[in-house]
Amino acid sequence: MSYEMYRQQFEGESFNDILVEQLRRTPWVLISAAVHALLFVILWQFVGSNEDEGPNEQATMEMEDEDVPDEEIIEEEPPEEEPEPEELVEDPVEVDEEVDDHDEDETNEDYEETKGEEDFISDKPFDSKSNNDAIGLGGGAGGSFGGRRGGRKRARRGRGRKAQAAVDKGLEWLARHQSPDGSWDCDGFMANGDASKGLLADGKGAPQWDVGVSGLSLLCFLGAGETHRNGQYRKTVAAGLKWLRNRQDGEGCFGSKTVSNFTYNHAIGALAMIEAFGLTKSPLFKSSAEKGIAYVQQCQNPYKAWRYKEADGQNDTSVTGWMVMALKSAKNAHVSIDERRFGWALDWITEMTDEESGRTGYIRAGEPPVREPNKKEEFPGEESESLTAVGICCRIFCGQDPTQERMIKLGVENLLSKKLPVWDQAKGSIDMYYWYYGTLAMYQIGGDSWKKWNEAMNEAIIERQRSDGNFSGSWDPKGAWGETGGRVYSTALMTLCLEVYYRYGRVFGTGK
C-alpha cells in the first residue's frame, strides 16, 4: 500500500484504532499464507518426482534401442548426431489397415470363436496415426515408414501364426546365408551355411544378380521393421546396406552397367536404399537414396517407360513395375522426384493393356507373360498373369482408384481371380514373381477377391517352406525364374509376399 493511500485511509484515526484494525485482519492473512505455502510444497514434490523419473526412463529406452554405431556402416565418414525424424505429411487417400493374415489353422481355439463373424477379415485402420509403411519390393501404400516398427507384434494372433512363423524362419535363413562382406551371393550363398547341419543348401542363381538379390533380402528385413539401429538383425542390415552403398557408381547406379539388363539390379538396389532412408532418416543413406532415384529417372524414356538400358527408347512392363515402385517409395520418403514420371508410366501400362480382356502385356498389348526358351513348355506363360498384376499395381500407385477404374476391375475379376496361386510343378503353375505382384495387387483390392487369393497363396507357399538342416526357412527355387534367381531370390520373394499383411496399407482404403 502506498503512503498516499495509507494516509487517506487512516487520516484522523488514532494509533490504537489503526492497531485494532490491523489485528482484526491478521488471521485471514495468516490463513492465506499457510494455504500458499502448502500449495508450494505439493508442487515441489510433483516436479521433483518427475525429474527423478526422467533419466531412468531415458536410460531404459536407450538400453532397449541399442544402436549399431553409424561408423560401423560407413567407416570413412565421421559419425554424426542423428537428427530427430521429421513429422511427415500423409497422403490424404492413404489409410492403414489392421493386420489379419488369415492363414488356415483350424486347431486354434480362436478360429471357432471368430469363424463367421462379420469382421473376421478386418480392414479397420490401426489406432496409430502413422501410415502402415511405404512400398517395399514391387508395391505398397506409402506413408511415414515409422508404423512398420513393431508391425509383426501388431499382427493378430490366431490364424496368422503360421504365416508369421514362416516370415521369421525366412529372415533367419537369409541372415545365416549372408556373406561376410554383407552381400547375398546368388551362386555362392551355400558357403555361408553350417556344415554341422548336414548338406549345404543348393539352388544356385546367376552371379550377375548379386545386387538385385541383396536388395531383395534387405527389403525383407526392412519390411519387418529391422534397421541398422533396431532389431535382432541390425548387424545384418548394417552390413548389407554398407555393401550395397559401395556398389553405387558416380551416376547413382547400383551395380555394374556391363550386365545386359542392369536396370533390374539398379531398381531393386535403389528401392532398398530408399526404404532404409525412409525408415531411419539417417544421413548415411540420404545421398545414396537421392542419387539412386535420380538415376531411376535418368533411365526413363521421355513420355514413356523403362527397359534394359538408360533411356534407349525401348520399354517393357516388367522393368517399369520395379521402377514405379522405387519412385513411389521415394515420394513417401520425401526424396525429391519429378511426379510427371508416374503419368508417363501409366500411359505405358494403358498402352500395354488389352481393353477386352484386361490383360497387360510385356512389350505388346495383351500378350501372355514371356518365358525363356528352355522354360516355355515346363512353365507356360498361359499359367500366369504376372504382368497383369504388375499393371494393376502400377495403376493403383500411379493414382487410379481400383473401385472406379474399369481396367483394374477387369484384370482382377477375369484374370487374377481365375489364376490363384497353386504349387503344381507338373502343371507348370509355379510363378513366384506372379504370386508376389498378385499378392500386392489383390491386397489393394481387398474384399472377397483378396480373401480367396490369400487363402490360396498361404496354402501354396507356407507348407512348401523347407524345415530341414541348412535348407530350413528357405523355399526351393522352382518356377519360371527360379533357376535364374536361385534360392536367395525365391526365399526373399516368398518372405516379402507374406509380409504384405503388416507392411502395406491400402492406398484407397478399399477392402472389408
Image: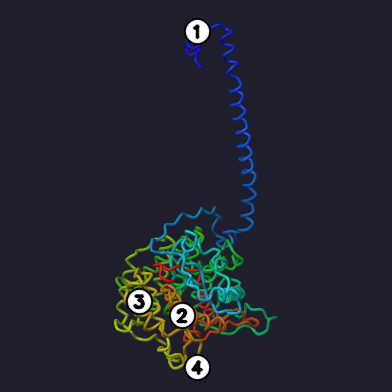
Q: Secondary structure at mark 4?
A: loop
Q: Amino acid at mark 2?
A: Trp
Q: Secondary structure at mark 1?
A: loop
What is the C-alpha distance between the residues marked 1 and 4?
A: 116 Å
Q: Amino acid at mark 4?
A: Ala
The image quarter containing residue 303 is bottom left
The image quarter containing residue 88 is bottom left
* Relative to 411, residue 221 above or below: above
The residue depicted at 63 percent of the width and 34 percent of the height is 41
Tell me residue 104's x, y (percent): 55, 79
Which of the marked residues, 3 or 1, is nearer the chain's N terminus?
1
What is the C-alpha distance between the residues marked 4 and 2?
A: 21 Å
Of badges 4 and 2, nearer the viewer stands 2
Tell me residue 184's x, y (percent): 55, 75
Q: Which residue is mark 4?
A: 426
Q: Amino acid at mark 3?
A: Ile
Q: Amino acid at mark 1?
A: Glu
Tell me residue 11's x, y (percent): 50, 7
Q: Residues within 10 Å of mark 2 (few under 14, many from 20)?
A: many
* Residue 497 in view here: yes
Of badges 3 and 1, nearer the viewer stands 1
Q: Which residue is mark 1?
A: 11
The residue depicted at 37 percent of the width and 77 percent of the height is 391
Q: Secondary structure at mark 2?
A: helix
* Residue 251 in view here: no
Q: Residues within 10 Å of mark 4 (few under 14, many from 20)?
A: few
